[in-house]
Image: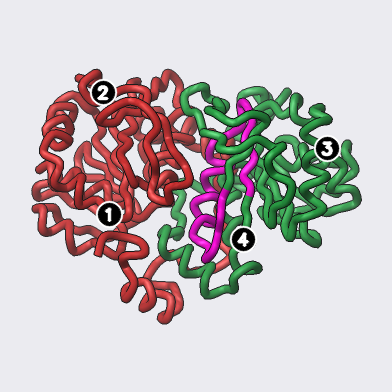
Chain colours: A green, B red
Amino acid sequence: MQITMVLYRRMTALDIVGPYEVLSRLPGAEITFAAAAPGPIPTDTGLLNLPATADFAEISRTDLVVVPGGPDVRAQTQDTRLHEWLREIDRTTTWTTSVCTGSLILAAAGLLERRRATTHWLVKDRLGDFGAEPAPGRVVIDGKYGTAAGVSAGIDLALTLAARIAGERIAQTIQLAIEYDPRPPFDAGSPDTAPEEVTDFLRSNRSLVVES
Amino acid sequence: MQITMVLYRRMTALDIVGPYEVLSRLPGAEITFAAAAPGPIPTDTGLLNLPATADFAEISRTDLVVVPGGPDVRAQTQDTRLHEWLREIDRTTTWTTSVCTGSLILAAAGLLERRRATTHWLVKDRLGDFGAEPAPGRVVIDGKYGTAAGVSAGIDLALTLAARIAGERIAQTIQLAIEYDPRPPFDAGSPDTAPEEVTDFLRSNRSLVVES
């Protein structure tokens, strides 16, 4: 199975490394990290580069594509060459997926038209601007389109995909191999459960997390 | 705050990228990715390199060190130069920490003597070989030593550290920023909850996950 992980400048590293850690363990998985040009891609903090091993032009088909998010995806929601490539590759995929604000890129490419989708909670309303239908849930599957909520939700998306692709037993085996039995020290991972002052702080300072 | 992320050949990428995604958001965090030599470090799948920006010799003090695990840490549990550096750096840290089998490396360096610690569930008994005391829990804190269970547990460790370092509100803000409200599709992330056949499969094929 050919899996393509999309990389671009100022993406969030965990958006890709979470799903990669799950999907690379699927039997027969062949993973390519692709970007507009091969070489080191600086992520959002400027502290960590992820290396692209291929450029988009080299990849004309893939079974599964994962598009990550980042704190400012404006460049990617306006990148018509990226959109063209995504539309072309989408014709060949079994699964077209995104993590966090990656869904805004898929939607801007026209791939989520009238599709139920999710994204980072701070920009969920923006999905509608691109014709997608914001839906509840940490992982939203609509046909072959799978979208995950913010950053860490890529792990849940990838396990969901692993089960669809290879069966529940394989997905559970991967989950146990990476000991994914999460115990966050606080119940603060969702605006529904986080202390109000924490949610309000991020709403008032959304540029810390997503494009303003 | 100086944070040093240790890299080595065949480490597991998520062991470091999970904590990095949390700790890099701490106010004043300065993160260095350090290895025996700077440059790209191949991780366990052979599919993804993480770039080391410094070599160990350049780092003589740090506030927090994170040691990742990998499927075969035998080389690292026998690497006396790495152990020497870890012991030296440990004299300067506020927190000395590990994810997954990284605790076996800390323990082999003599840093977890009579300390309560955890590691990947498949090798928990090995902690005792190095004088540490295997303890229950996904994150175990004993004094300034923090150890996490397998792979994905590094995120829980990092949020726990974030709260101790910068207070609960900051930790909760980071948790909400990365929308860490985990919803694994299966309750299979621990040997206590996974289907018996899944646990038995990994016990019989532990070399798929950790050193045999």
Q: Which mark is nearer the camera, 2 or 3?
A: 3
- For marks 2 and 4, give the CA distance: 42 Å
Q: Are marks 2 and 4 in contact (CB under 8 Å)?
A: no
Q: Which mark is nearer the camera, 3 or 1?
A: 3
Which is nearer the N-term, disc 2 or disc 1? 2
Name the residue tied to disc 4. Answer: A1
Instruction: Tell me the residue at 68%/54% (across/down).
Output: A64
Q: Which mark is nearer the camera, 4 or 1?
A: 4
Q: Which mark is residue A84?
A: 3
Disc 3, SS: helix
Amino acid under disc 2: Thr
Disc 1, SS: loop
Q: Chain of mark 1?
A: B
- For marks 4 and 1, give the CA distance: 26 Å
Q: Which mark is residue B72?
A: 1
- For marks 3 and 1, give the CA distance: 42 Å
Q: Residue furthest front?
A: A58
Q: Nearer the viewer, residue B150 or A29?
A: A29
Instruction: Tell me the residue at 58%/34% (across/down).
Output: A12
Amino acid under disc 4: Met
Name the residue tied to disc 2. Answer: B62
Amino acid under disc 3: Glu
**As drawn, A123 above or below A155:** above
- For marks 2 and 1, give the CA distance: 26 Å
Amino acid under disc 1: Asp
Q: Are marks 2 and 1 in contact (CB under 8 Å)?
A: no
Residues at marks 2 and 3 on the same chain: no
Q: Which mark is nearer the camera, 2 or 1?
A: 1
Coordinates of residue A135 in the picture (x, y in percent): 79, 52
